[in-house]
Image (spheres, helix red, strand yellow):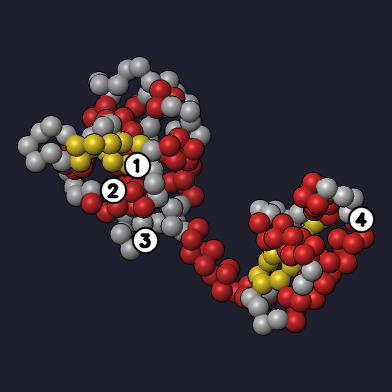
Amino acid sequence: MSYLQKQIEALIFCAPSPIKVEEIQRALEELLNEPIKKSDIRVQVSSLIQKYDEQDSIFGICEIGGGYQFLSKPAYNKIISIWLKQKSKRKLSRTALETLALIAYKQPVTKADIERIRGVSADYAFQRLLEKELISIKGKARSPGRPLLYGTSEKFMHYFGINSIDDLPLPEELDFPAVQLDLANTIDNSQPTLFDQAQNLLGSSETTDNPDND
């Protein structure tokens, strides 16, 4: 395989979306500091396509969307489809969302505090929220036993489309009775914004509060 072909292969491999010949051309010309013909690029890409077609590989290079991209071969579409369907069902349950809302408003807060508010164990909800990196450990409380304190993460901001905790809506605007009951008289300085996305997630989620499906 030529040096030029290896560089092209690397570009197609790392591109998050179909990469166009013009994009490949600009990158190569900056790397090599010399003109590169589009026809030469197409020849090298054709050679790469043929190479992966002939190999016993699960993926290959496809021309799609006006560019080139590595994609799995049709023989593996079924198993990938099954995985994607299963993944789409693994959204947060109502229990996890209510727990997350409480953490967002009461942070930093201990797991015991959340369990006292909800009246049930929060072990699994905390596990799921930590796995999804929506909450993080913020330190330890000064109370006996020095329990861990939890709060929302940067990923939480991105997940719900807000810039800071100050963008959270008023508790009474949430569709979470447990949150409303505990926070209605303690939070009065938040501004309503996009936290209702949580309700949209609940409406489209196929999960329940069963840990096997959460």
Mark 4 and mark 3: Cα distance apart in space: 53 Å
Mark 2 and mark 3: Cα distance apart in space: 15 Å
Mark 1 and mark 4: Cα distance apart in space: 50 Å
Observer-side mark, 1 or 3, equals 1
Q: Which one is nearer the viewer's eye here, 2 or 203?
A: 2
Mark 1 and mark 2: Cα distance apart in space: 8 Å
- Residue annotated with mark 4: 37
- Residue annotated with mark 1: 135
Observer-side mark, 1 or 2, equals 1
Q: Is residue 161 above or below residue 16?
A: above
Q: Earlier in the sequence, mark 1 or mark 4?
A: 4
Q: Secondary structure at mark 4?
A: loop
Q: Amino acid at mark 3?
A: Asn
Q: Residue furthest top?
A: 189
Q: Residue at x 48, y 30 (%)?
A: 162
| Quadrant of res 3 | bottom right
Mark 1 closeness class: few <14, some 14–19, many ≥20 residues within 10 Å: many
Say the numbered circle drawn on residue 213: 3
Mark 2 and mark 4: Cα distance apart in space: 55 Å
Say the numbered circle drawn on residue 126: 2
